[in-house]
Image: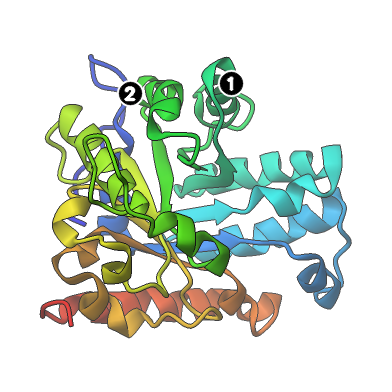
């Protein structure tokens, strides 16, 4: 992503857009997205409880390792939610620590609903005056892309981002996501490609930023050709690409996989960062940031 200076205060027309802030963060640090995934097994291996103290300690390790090296942290909300109210308190502490460290926070909540329900999900997670005030959230469009309208409007009003699930790595989703649309403006495209084009249109309609405010979730282990998705379809959307590290995607393949869109990709890794325990996280994060820089320095076309 091209580095874009972030204004220190909101512009007269409203808050600084998410895409502008994201581009600046990537330019200043790296396109690494550090997943904060406190699995029960990992907590146990680290000697931490699945309670407020344990979850807070886990979040602290990941945030501190990411600070100054990564653009984004992505707490997987389910692992905090499983601990109930205590988990949400730990999540709040983790989000605040990340923002104080200058990191952007993508709340991995995968919400998606219609009407006022969807609107209030957005208010909860990305409203600047809401309880969590994350910089962006993940959403599912599989009740129809139009059902996200309220969420997109809340995001726009708050300078926040939305990452829309399009092509995911779980095998159960493949039949749905590769199905060909029989009618409507995207007829002849796959369901996943239709969502990608919807996102590109949304970014096109709301500005000429080099990096859009509405992003895509595209599994890093997938061949996008299998889903009928091209680089031109993606447009200016930032791409959140989970699957690096333990799931098998290689940072060195960024250019080969994404071509000219490689600079728009957030390299998301979680489990692989935990391999050497809490004392080794910072070293692994630094390694990933260096490898991303080296991979993006390589020029070439999609294989």
Instruction: Return the residue at label 2.
Output: 15
Q: Quadrant of residue 89?
A: top right
Which is more foreground, mark 1 or mark 2?
1
Question: What coloring was used for the rendering?
Answer: rainbow
Is residue 126 shown left or right of residue 211?
A: right
Q: Where 215 falls versus 284 (above or below)?
A: above
Which badge, 1 or 2, comes first in the chain's sequence?
2
Residue drawn at the location 42% of the way across and 75% of the way down: 221
C-alpha span from label 1 to label 2: 20 Å
Q: Residue at (38%, 73%) from the top-left corner? A: 289
User: Of the numbered discs in the image, which one, if any, rests on residue 120?
Assistant: 1
- Give how far across and how far down residue 153 sits, in percent: 38, 21
When the figure is inspected, residue 268 is found, relative to residue 201, above or below; the finding is below
* Residue 133 picture location, percent across and down: 54, 31
Looking at the image, do the residues carrying marks 1 and 2 touch, with CB atoms under 8 Å apart? no
Q: Secondary structure at mark 2?
A: loop
Residue 63 in the image, given as x and y percentages of width and height: 58, 58
Q: Quadrant of residue 5?
A: top left
């Amino acid at each position: 992503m091209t580095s874009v200076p972030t204004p220190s205060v909101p512009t007269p027309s409203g808050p600084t857009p998410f895409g502008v802030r994201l581009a600046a963060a990537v330019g200043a640090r790296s396109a690494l997205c550090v997943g904060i995934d406190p699995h029960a097994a990992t907590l146990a291996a680290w000697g931490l409880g699945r309670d407020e103290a344990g979850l807070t300690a886990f979040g602290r390790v990941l945030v501190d390792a990411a600070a100054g090296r990564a653009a984004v942290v992505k707490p997987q909300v389910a692992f905090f939610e499983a601990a109930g109210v205590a988990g949400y308190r730990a999540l709040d502490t983790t989000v605040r620590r990340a923002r104080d460290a200058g990191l952007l926070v993508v709340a991995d909540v995968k919400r998606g609903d219609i009407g006022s329900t969807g609107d209030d999900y957005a208010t909860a997670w990305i409203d600047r005056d809401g309880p969590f005030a994350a910089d962006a959230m993940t959403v599912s469009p599989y009740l129809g892309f139009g059902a996200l309208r309220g969420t997109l409007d809340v995001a726009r009003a708050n300078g926040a981002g939305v990452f829309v699930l399009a092509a995911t790595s779980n095998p159960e989703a493949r039949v749905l996501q590769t199905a060909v649309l029989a009618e409507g403006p995207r007829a002849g495209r796959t369901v996943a490609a239709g969502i990608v084009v919807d996102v590109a249109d949304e970014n096109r309609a709301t500005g000429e930023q080099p990096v859009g405010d509405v992003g895509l979730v595209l599994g890093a282990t997938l061949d996008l050709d299998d889903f009928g998705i091209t680089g031109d379809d993606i447009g200016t959307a930032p791409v959140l690409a989970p699957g690096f590290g333990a799931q098998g995607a290689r940072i060195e393949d960024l250019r080969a996989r994404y071509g000219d869109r490689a600079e728009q990709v957030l390299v998301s890794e979680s489990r692989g960062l935990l391999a050497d325990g809490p004392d080794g996280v910072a070293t692994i994060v630094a390694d990933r940031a260096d490898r991303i820089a080296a991979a993006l320095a390589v020029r070439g076309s999609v294989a």
